[in-house]
Image: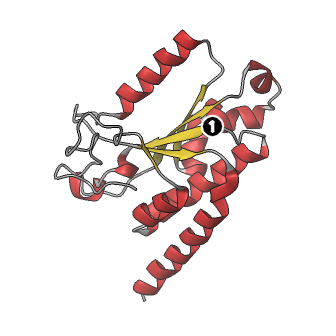
Amino acid sequence: MIPEWNAEGVLPPINEDDPTGFDRAPYEVTLGQVVDRFATSQERCDILEGFLAHRAELHKMGMDNGFQWLDGSFTEDIELLEHRPPRDIDVVTFTPANDDFFGMLEERQINLLGGDRENLKKEFRIDFYVQSLSDPAEALVAMTTYWYSMWSHRRTGQWKGFLKVDLSPSQDAEAKNLLVARQQELAHEQI
């Protein structure tokens, strides 16, 4: 379950009722829970649509094992904090794909994995990174620590939580259907 934003407008980094427990960021959730919670405006729906379209591209190239951490202003109450909608969603994908997999990719696929960050933000509304789970243990720990420290804090230094979703395509169709329904609800509300 995705916790409610705390008084500071962010996901709590830990369960304050059990601060040493395992109920903490990254919170493991389903894609449907992400859509249900964050598809609250047309801007947020557009970001989710881009995120799900990008996931479909990853799946087409065979990257469908692992998980993704979701973060950024998208997972914050940025409308309250900065009086604006989120611009994109930050995504780091942890995958067992190795150098052999990455070496077989075409230029377009490399660009989908972060080779063309500007286009990824424009076309899919994501700030995207990849972390191979096949890296040597010390490098993997170092990079996971890096991502955790980057994503567990706002640029202001404020501590915050973030989300984890499975990379498997098993939840994508349901999430897309939920998103379409939410977009229709929002369009109906504007009439």
Direction bottom: furthest residue: 191
Q: Residues within 10 Å of mark 1 (few under 14, many from 20)?
A: some
Q: Quadrant of residue 177?
A: bottom right
Foreground: 128 or 92?
Answer: 92
Mark 1 residue type: Gly
Residue beneath the point at 51% across and 74% down:
183
Q: How is the image coloured?
A: secondary structure
| Quarter of the image that includes the C terminus | bottom left
Residue 34 point in image, percent of width and height: 47, 58
| Quarter of the image that includes the N terminus | bottom left
Left or right: residue 158 compared with residue 63: left
Describe the element under mark 1 as helix, strand or loop.
Answer: loop
Residue 110 point in image, percent of width and height: 71, 32
Residue 161 point in image, percent of width and height: 33, 42
Residue 41 point in image, percent of width and height: 40, 68
Residue beneath the point at 38% across and 43% down:
162
Foreground: 89 or 181?
Answer: 181
Q: Quadrant of residue 172?
A: bottom right
Foreground: 136 or 58?
Answer: 136
Left or right: residue 96 compared with residue 185: right
Residue 190 visible in the picture: no
Numbered circles on residues, count: 1
Above or below: residue 131 compared with residue 127: above
Residue 82 visible in the picture: yes
Left or right: residue 13 compared with residue 63: left
Direction left: furthest residue: 7
Above or below: residue 146 compared with residue 37: above
Q: Which residue is mark 1?
A: 66
Residue beneath the point at 35% across and 26% down:
149
